[in-house]
Amino acid sequence: MFENLQKSKQYAAAEAVATVQNGMTVGLGTGSTASYAIELLAKRIRGGLFIKAVASSFRSEDLAKKLGIQLIPFSEVDAIDVYIDGADEIDNDLNLIKGGGGALLREKILAFDAKEFIVIADSSKRVENLGRFPLPVEVVPFGLELTVKQLQKLGCTISLRVEDNKTYTTDNGNLVIDCDFKKIEIVQQLHDSINNIPGVVENGLFLKTMVTKLIIGYNNGSVEVNSARSYQYA
Ligand code: A5P
């Protein structure tokens, strides 16, 4: 049966937003699923919920401001209580590929700090092995050709991200190389090898230790909630 992915994303987002409590500092993710969470959070705020928020991209910041969510500077963040974001691929162990929307560095900074990182997605994001979705890697513009050569040595086919016929630039003024590995065998090893290349700022592999909860939504309104420790691929 055809699954309405937008509805599935909304249900996953709603389940995550329902866990947010008064007084929390909330990290706002980036992408279509995270945007649903931002909209639902704004709705709860209109209903009386009081929170502070930080955003993982200019796009999410703009959306939050437009919807009346109070954003605070990082100097005022004691700790992020919960970070809610989508993913491009989710494996059996809750390792993720993120960064399809180009915000991987800011997303990882927020997710790493958060006491709870809730991943929200439709079921199409679940895979047995990461790697069919090309892995986004944020790199500095200087020495691009040399960094590309080092990435290729790791066994991938690379493409420099382009948007609207222009080289894509991240919110941090960097570039994104999408690395097609087809199948990633040892996630942690690849993560470390990529980040050991000097021109690399960050890569889109989010290791399982970061994720505390996965919420998969289905278009019939049901959700599957898995805590990181007990989650198994179904
Ligand atoms: C943004 O940079 C990404 O990490 C997104 O979280 C990811 O691409 C998922 O996006 P969707 O929710 O739009 O599928």
Image (tube, rainbow, N blue to C red):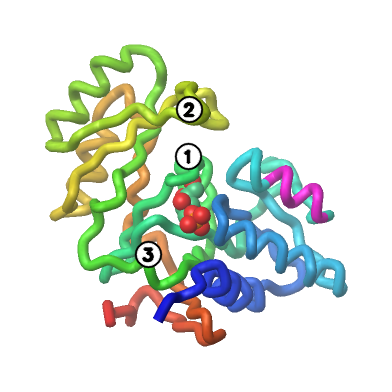
Residue drawn at the location 72% of the way across and 49% of the way down: 63
Q: Establish if 195 lies above or below 208.
A: above
> In the rendered structure, are the residues bearing label 2 and label 1 in contact, judged by CB atoms less than 8 Å apart?
yes
Residue 124 percent coordinates (x, y): 37, 68
How busy is the neighbourhood of tag 1: few (under 14 within 10 Å), some, or many (20 plus)? many
How busy is the neighbourhood of tag 3: few (under 14 within 10 Å), some, or many (20 plus)? some
Classified by dominant secondary structure, the portion drawn in magenta counts as helix
Residue drawn at the location 50% of the way across and 69% of the way down: 5
Q: Which residues are magenta?
A: 61-67
Q: Which residue is mark 3?
A: 125
Residue drawn at the location 35% of the way across and 59% of the way down: 89
Q: Is ligand 1 within 8 Å of the beta carbon of the residue shown at mark 3?
A: yes
Q: Is ligand 1 within 8 Å of the beta carbon of the residue shown at mark 1?
A: yes
How far apart are the two marked residues, 3 and 1, measured between alpha carbons? Answer: 17 Å
Question: Along the horizontal axis of the image, is 153 left or right of 112?
Answer: left
Question: Foreground residue, 221 or 203?
Answer: 221
Front of the two marks 2 and 1: 2
Q: Quarter-wise, where is residue 209 in the image?
A: bottom left
Residue drawn at the location 58% of the way across and 59% of the way down: 34
Q: Which residue is mark 1?
A: 102
Does the rendering let one see residue 201?
no
Question: Along the horizontal axis of the image, is 99 left or right of 230?
Answer: right
Question: Foreground residue, 217 or 137?
Answer: 217
Amino acid type at circle 1 is Gly
Residue 28 percent coordinates (x, y): 62, 55
How far apart are the two marked residues, 2 and 1, measured between alpha carbons? Answer: 9 Å
Does the rendering let one see residue 177?
yes
> In the rendered structure, are the residues bearing label 3 and label 1 in contact, judged by CB atoms less than 8 Å apart?
no
In terms of sequence position, does the residue under pointer 3 or pointer 1 come before the other? Answer: 1
Give the structural element (helix, strand or loop) at label 2.
loop
How far apart are the two marked residues, 2 and 3, measured between alpha carbons? Answer: 24 Å
